[in-house]
Amino acid sequence: MNEFLVNFLANVLAEAMLGVAVYYAVTQPRERKSKQTNMRKALGLLMAEIEVNRERAKRYVSALGTSAVEEEVRRLFPLRFTRGAWNALRESNLLPQLNDAQLVYYLLRMNEASLVANRNLRKLQLACLGDTEADVRQLAETAKRNCEHFLSVSSRVVEILGRMALPSFEIEELEEEIDEEEHLGQDE
């Protein structure tokens, strides 16, 4: 009987150790936790970028709705939405790892809205500088609609991301860094 218990306990202990080893080999909990932390940080940075872009969109909508469009637009040069955090999220292959299909859908729509808005804001900027013969009023109206569309789509993204416990980044610091990068790019 004694020999039976020793063999039984040895087999149970060996299988338990094997189970623990397989668990760590297959699941790699540290790596998974690290990926989740990186995902949360990336989404937090994206959220900060969205907030910066939403503030810009509100300023653009306000400026594009005035009668002195050219003067108002010139004050806001360069006209564009930033996309650095979005590009990093996409290029680092984190986007396919998101489990929320609704979030992915609205992120893709927001990206499309920002691309279209950036293109039309650039056309407006060139028209205000006199580089093209385009109608400034018509371009301003189109750009205003694009910015309003960006605001509506990005509000859904903010709503979804707001439900997650994401790390926060100081928007003012991020905006200052973006402005410094823009000025460096213009000097070159």
Image (cartoon, rainbow, N blue to C red):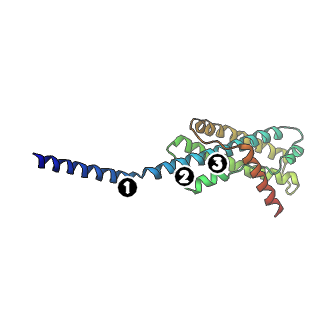
Say which of marks 2 and 3 sits in front. Answer: 2
Considering every residue shown, the one lying at the far front of the view is 2
Residue 103 visible? The answer is: yes
- Mark 1 or 2, which is nearer the eye? 1
Asked which secondary structure carries label 1, the reply is helix
Image-quadrant location for residue 169: top right
Say which element carries label 2.
loop
- The percent position of residue 175, horizontal first and vertical second, equals 75, 47
Residue found at the very far left of the displayed protein: 1
Determine which of the numbered discs, if any, sits on residue 94 in the image: 2
Which residue corresponds to mark 1?
Answer: 25
Q: CA distance from mark 3 to mark 1?
A: 38 Å
Residue density around tag 2, few if under 14, some if 14–19, many if 20 or more, within 10 Å:
some
Residue 168 lies, in percent from the top left, at 64, 42
The quadrant in which residue 44 appears is top right
Front of the two marks 3 and 1 = 1
Q: Residue at x 86, y 57 (%)?
A: 131
Q: Position of residue 93 (x, y in %)?
A: 54, 55
- Looking at marks 3 and 1 on the same chain, the residue that comes earlier in the sequence is marked by 1
Q: Residue at x 69, y 39 (%)?
A: 151
Q: Secondary structure at mark 3?
A: helix
The reply to whether dot 2 and dot 3 touch (C-beta < 8 Å) is no
Callout 1 crowding tier (Cα within 10 Å): few <14, some 14–19, many ≥20: few
Give the CA distance from mark 2 to mark 3: 15 Å
